[in-house]
Image (tube, rainbow, N blue to C red):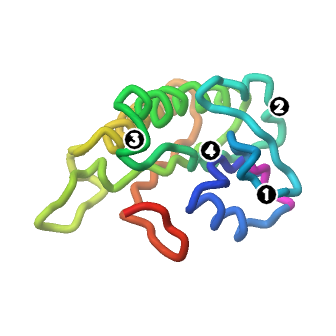
Amino acid sequence: MILLTGVTGFIGSKLLSRLPAQDVVAACRNPERFCAYKKSLYFNLDTDSYVDFDFNGIKTIIHLAAIAHSSAGSEMEFNQRNHLSVLRFAQAAADAGVRRFIFLSSIGVNGGSSSKPFAHDDTPNPHDIYSTSKYNAELALKEISIKTGLEVVIIRPPLVYGKGAPGS
């Protein structure tokens, strides 16, 4: 079973529609924006309201929930939502026996621009509060992985766009 966070977001809503419904539990913090879904739950990562969630049967978490646009918050808000809440959530998942945590980070962790294509082994150079918060989450997830054995997968996508994309 997969627990998918961020299902009301641009990427999350698209991914949710493509995953087999019987294999997914959809999680979101904003039930007013959430369309009816077969297996859904509401929790707010910022307030740790998932602490009573029974992770039993969840093998993989795909964590897409985040704030993404620089106008969306202060440095403190980005750090809270994109780093600290991820750290606590991943630790709770690891403690409950979840095997894999897939984290959607950002290509911005590599820098704002480059004269050559970015590579997986480039030295991180986050260039704004969003990419810094994502990088800090990556570092925290790697520590949790070392301590607990949780398999952590970090994806740094470039700008994702398409019909209805709210961003750049």
Q: CA distance from mark 4 to mark 1?
A: 26 Å
Q: Is residue 120 magenta?
A: no
**Furthest residue toward bottom:** 163
Distance CA(mark 1)–CA(mark 3): 27 Å
Write down the residue under mark 1.
Answer: 35
The kind of residue on which mark 4 rests is Arg
Query: Could you classify mark 2 by the number of other residues whose Cα lies within 10 Å: few (under 14), some (14-19), or many (20 or more)?
Result: few
Quadrant in the picture for residue 44: top right
* Secondary structure of the residue carrying numbered label 1: loop
**Residue 17: where, in percent of width, then height?**
72, 68
- Depth check, front residue: 33 or 43: 33
Q: Which mark is residue 134?
A: 3
Q: Residue type at mark 2?
A: Asp
Q: Viewer-proximal residue, 123 or 115?
A: 115
Query: Mark 2 — residue?
Result: 54
- Classify the position of the C terminus by image quarter: bottom left
